[in-house]
Image (cartoon, rainbow, N blue to C red):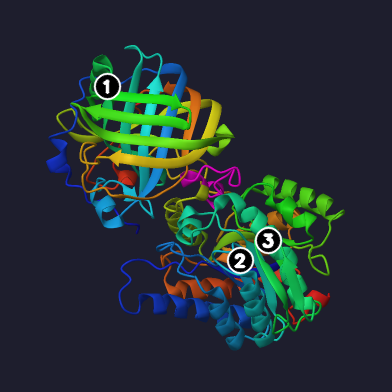
Amino acid sequence: MPLFGSLDVSARGGQSPVVASLADDTWEAEDSEILYLIFEYAADAAFQCIPPALHPALPPFGGLMFRHHPTSPVGPYTLAELRVTARAGVHYVGYCTGGFVDNPDAVEMLRDRYGWPVRQADVRLRRRYYGVEGRVELDGKTVADCRLEKPQIISGKDVLYTANMHLAQIDGRPRLAQVEAEYTFHRAERGAAHIATLDTGAFGEPRLKPTNPLPATMTQSTVKYREIRFLVEPDKPALHNTERIA
Amino acid sequence: MKFGIFFEISVPRPWDAGREKQVYDNCMEQTVLADELGFHSVWAVEHHFLEEYSHCSAPEIFLTACAMKTRNLRVGHGIAVCVPEINHPIRLAERAATLDLISDGRLEFGTGRSATWTEIGGFGGNPDTTKATWDEFVRAIPQMWMQERYAHDGTYFSMPERAVLPKPIQKPHPPLWVAVTSPGTELDAAERGMGALGLTFGDLAEQERKVKAYRQRLENCEPVGAFVNDRIASVNFLFCHEDDATGVETGKRLQGTFRYLAAQLVSAREAYASPSYASFGLLPQLRRAPSGPDDTGALPPALCIGDPKRIVETLKGWESTGIDQVNFLLNANETVPQEEVMASLRLFAKEVMPHFRDEPAAAGEAAE
């Protein structure tokens, strides 16, 4: 049997978002931009950072993802999140350890409806002469500063984004909410990843140690966020402990 | 139609003392029995770092032992990885030729390029170039075997003129195959006059389309070797039992375990955005995309599980697609006890094999 994560859910659960009303509708964001910097993680620590419901990817990997949505139900926002790729049964997912959003209304929407473990900070995603810059400033301190350099056009078919898994308080107890989105790509680029600063502690998991960066991607797409369809017991294997709610 | 056995050599945790040894011993015991029962070939993968899924990183050594313990089974590299960071082409040629000598001319040489970031990344390989390195290797290796001395000035490797030794016993050289996982690779095989070693679990209609396209493309091929290997093989699970319900139940457990392990692998495309890996390779063909954490995907159609009657009917379907051989996965993570695997092989040989034209394997198939 594959390995399972060993995150202490009871300890972590208390810090997680409290979902007031699970997302039960869809919304779409045209002209969205997503920067994804992918890297491997030191294995033992990565295993400790995902819930026992999930299998770690081998080698453990994940990344820092920036999402800029010019439109949303609460207006434009830019999000930065740290992810650990995992398997829920045989389903590919990215467990989100934490993140930041620049729009306070978006923070509220994402926490209350999706269990997205985000806080407010200054999050920037912008094109520069060398490629793309992603940056997060929290209370005047830089907690993420990264670049995609020397971008080259690739096909959107070459890019794969997986669903998010969020540990949240749902109906008064910790559960994992699977957050799914559909992507229609209009443009995709790939380039070298350069990470000047990444405070994984600020993103909820100081134990995570990025190693071995892989090529980064930048895409323009229409993103359609779905209603929450699956809830998973975080401390039991996902295959047999998933509730379909939609 | 011929039948082979195909090993990933998956080893369940915990990997305590003796576990890996026991699994290897079990595979060897199955190989010896398969030889006695009249199977055509034994294939072993080359995989690296794939925890539990496959502990078969040195297949040429395992296959050498298979050759020493069998008389008729052909021994198949299924596959040798043609990525320079993993294998130098000279070493591939040398090891394969040695295996051909030791097996008395029973080598089938399968080639491929790996489908996982776990492996390619582990060796520092570049997913963007694996198709090109594979192409350069499969053109060079037959020349290394056939020419007394060989020199190469290529894109991904070069060598001054040297005698690559030993030379294989099969003349002009052993049959060449390509692992077919990504859609369209069967056409790559056909264009080069190589056999298509199918490693996915498609349905019959899909297989029939692939066979037709392969045969059409083969008509205008430019062989990389000295002859065309025009065979097509497919892979399937095998669990044969007198009681159909028991056979199906155990077979489902076998394929379910295999698919669960396969889903844990990190495909090249998942981690490394590259046009060279437009599909997941082996992984998606194992199942339709699961919709959620509680979904294992649909059962692949036309599996060789159940009683002999059901398996005969299933294989007649596969035979109708025009394939030449089916290679069977017999176990996954030791989920089926060894004695049941052995009994399944015996029953298959007794009740199923006679329904199919099956010529005994022999040395020197390259010259056919």
**Marks 1 and 3, how far apart at CA:** 49 Å
Nearer to us in this view, B337 or A95: A95
Nearer to us in this view, B31 or A142: A142
Q: Is residue B330 above or below residue A153?
A: below
Give the percent coordinates (x, y) of residue B131. 64, 54
At horizontal 39% and vertical 75% (from top left) the residue drawn is B20
At horizontal 38% and vertical 55% (from top left) the residue drawn is A58
Could you tell me if residue A242 is visible in this image?
Answer: yes
Q: Are marks 2 and 3 on the same chain?
A: yes
Q: Quadrant of residue A126?
A: top left
Q: Which residue is mark 3?
A: B178
Q: Amino acid at mark 1?
A: Arg
Task: Name the chief secondary structure element in magenta.
Answer: loop
Q: Which residue is mark 2?
A: B79
User: What span is in magenta?
Assistant: B269-286
Residue at mark 3: chain = B
Residue B76 is marked as none
* Element at label 1: helix
Residue A29 appears left or right of A24: right
Query: Which of disc 3 and disc 2 is earlier in sequence?
Result: 2
Q: Amino acid at mark 3?
A: Val
Residue A113 is marked as 1
Q: Are marks 1 and 3 on the same chain?
A: no
Q: How would you rate the neighbour count of disc 3 (Cα within 10 Å): few for under 14, some for 14-19, many for 20 or more?
A: many
Could you tell me if residue B181 is visible in this image?
Answer: no
Asked whether residue A22 is drawn in magenta, I would say: no
Q: Amino acid at mark 2?
A: Ile
Q: How would you rate the neighbour count of disc 2 (Cα within 10 Å): few for under 14, some for 14-19, many for 20 or more?
A: many
* Element at label 2: strand
